[in-house]
Amino acid sequence: MPDGLILLAALVANIVGMGWFALAMEPHWRQVRGAAERTPTTAMRLRVLGAAALATALALCITVDHPTMAVLVWVMALAGAALLIAF
């Protein structure tokens, strides 16, 4: 698979992970789901899914670049994903 597609997949994983982390918080849950109840189990599942997505993104970055460069790319992708989710 081309490196560009792997990095794109890492960026998508970061965006999805940040979205799941945001949905785990009550105010964001209410903005998206309205009156639907957010149980503690749902919040924990969203946090676990978010962490798994971010870990997957890191693993994808490491497959493309040297570990020191991969971490830099991953952190920059995290910042971009957080900004995208915030807006």
Image (cartoon, helix red, strand yellow):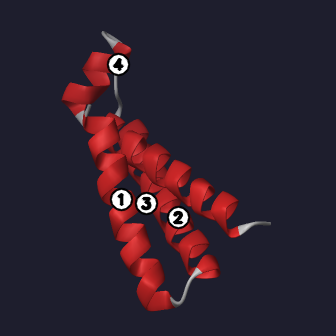
Residue annotated with mark 1: 78
| Spot occupied by residue 71 in the image (x, y as percentages of width and height) | 41, 79
The numbered mark, 3 or 4, whose residue comes first in the sequence reads 4
C-alpha separation, residue under disc 2 versus residue under disc 1: 9 Å
Residue annotated with mark 2: 57
Which numbered dot is residue 32? 4
Return the residue found at the far top: 35
Query: Crowdedness of circle 1 by 10 Å Cα count: few (<14), some, many (20+)?
Result: many
C-alpha separation, residue under disc 3 versus residue under disc 2: 10 Å
C-alpha separation, residue under disc 3 versus residue under disc 1: 12 Å
Amino acid on which the number 4 mark rests in the picture? Val
Residue placed most toward the observer, 37 or 46: 46
Query: Crowdedness of circle 3 by 10 Å Cα count: few (<14), some, many (20+)?
Result: some
| Spot occupied by residue 49 in the image (x, y as percentages of width and height) | 49, 51
Q: Considering the numbered disc 2 on the image, is that residue within a helix, a strand or a loop?
A: helix
Q: Considering the numbered disc 1 on the image, is that residue within a helix, a strand or a loop?
A: helix
Work out whether residue 38 can be spotted. Answer: yes
Tell whether 24 sits left or right of 55: left
State yes or no: discs 2 and 1 in contact (Cβ < 8 Å): yes
Residue placed most toward the observer, 33 or 6: 6
Residue annotated with mark 3: 51
The residue lying at 57 percent from left, 74 percent from top is 59
The numbered mark, 1 or 4, whose residue comes first in the sequence reads 4
The residue lying at 45 percent from left, 55 percent from top is 48
